[in-house]
Amino acid sequence: MPETVNLDPNIFRAYDIRGTVGEQITPEVIRLIARGFGSKLAERAPATVVVGRDLRESSEELSAAAVEGFRASGCDVIDIGEAPTPLVYFAIGRWDCAGGLGVTASHKPVGFNGVKLRLGEYPFYGDDLAALRKFLEAGEFVEGNGSYKQRDIYAEYFEVCAAKFDGDCKLRIYLDLGNGCGVFNAQRLLEIAGCEVDTLYAEPDGTFPNRSPDPMAPGALDALAGRIAEGSYDLGMAIDADGDRLAVLDDRADLVSPDKYVLPLCAHLMDSGHSTFVSEVRCSQTTIDFVRARGGEVTLAACGYPFILSEMAQVSAPLGFETTGHVFFDDPDIKFDDAAFCAANLAVALGHQDATLREMLEQAPKYFTSPEKRLGCPDEVKHAVVADVIEVFKPDHEMNTVDGARISFRGGWGLIRASNTGEELVMRFEGKTEADRDAIANQVLAAVSEAMRAHGVA
């Protein structure tokens, strides 16, 4: 690796590469990453890759550096310019490319940037990212001189999506685009579905002057909630900065968690004959009970979109969803987390129900969910702590251990898992009453504290 490139190992996360602009993330770093990734793609045959970018002020320069790195490894580059990350994925599949790269820091603050990599139509993550870092450090790259061209993806994307909707949805939606990449596709998809749409922060601006790039950040949707309160809207919707996460407010401007706003989607799909859906271990029992009452089932996977996608394939599920706002459809063209596509499908699904989203939630089994609790714990012992907690409850409690342990209690459940991305334990608790929830939390936290002390952690 050239000595002039400072490659901070901390930028390699579980599912992407990201860090602070100008310090951890520079054009030289992105050029190196693209050259190394391109070398792996070009090892067997000439490779064509897609490059796209979000609206951050640093993204244009970083995207140009990625293009240079790919071309230097012999890859032919198709540049789609400013686009939601899902459209990078769509272009890769549509044009049968070897892979690609989206320059984005997703929903992180403006001082961050990075890349999301794609190998063919599949996410490039985890151990593959770790192996890529070692390959970059070795610096044994393929040499080449790939071609470059710019190409529009939007016409094909809208043509494909238009064929999926009848245009008969009559819902009234207030859409908060947050000045992010959703400005390029979300309103149009909702209108293709037949919705009446009013927009907020619809001007592309990578400084995100009006709200956080993360629509689920505290206070981010206050303005949207105010607009809904002033008028008669069926839903409020908000898109994150790179267009892959959806936040939803009901008709009274209350935020609905993603594992619950999918109720209309589940109901609509069950009306069409489907029965099995996939979520992750943090999913509310409200949704699980709602689906079971209608003869279906929610299968719980480990946290993280690669695990959701894998489980969807194994059980032939038409829908998968995370508590973070990433929603996936078993669709031949949009088989990834596209917030605009999800928004349109959600509106259509709700339009087929005889109740509002709020009414559906009021009719569903009610549970009280705690915020996610994070507790610092060193990497070398965090999995051992979780294992010890499992042993405490295993004799008397049913549990799902696909990712840590989701432990069943009378009146609810408690979850403990080791974080995929940091030195910490992650916990969540849910009960039929607040008292049930808090009692479960106390039992699990007591076991966690004892296990941490046993491993020498205060």
Image (cartoon, grey):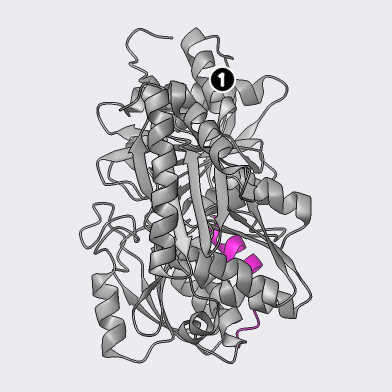
Q: Is residue 78 left or right of residue 319?
A: left
Three-letter amino acid code of the residue under disc 1 = Ala
Establish if 363 lies above or below 99: below
Residue 263: x, y in percent?
57, 74
Q: Which residue is located at x 54 percent, y 59 percent?
A: 283
Q: Is residue 122 or residue 167 the one in the foreground?
A: 122
- Tell me where residue 251 sits by quadrant: bottom left
Task: Work out which quarter of the rendered image holds the C terminus and state it.
Answer: top left
Circle 1 sits on which residue? Answer: 131
x and y, in percent, of residue 68 in the image: 45, 27
**Is residue 160 found inside the magenta-colored segment of the image?**
yes
Q: Is residue 314 visible?
A: yes
Q: Name the quadrant containing residue 141.
A: top right
Q: Is residue 11 above or below residue 428?
A: above
Segment colored magenta: 153-168
In this view, the residue in front, 315 or 172, is 315
Q: Is residue 410 left or right of residue 233?
A: right
Is 32 left, or right, of 37 in this rendering?
A: left
Q: Is residue 242 visible?
A: no
- Closest to the observer, 372 or 393: 393
Q: Position of residue 34 (x, y in %)?
A: 49, 27
Query: Which quarter of the rendering shows the N terminus?
Result: top left
Residue that appears at 49% across and 82% down: 357
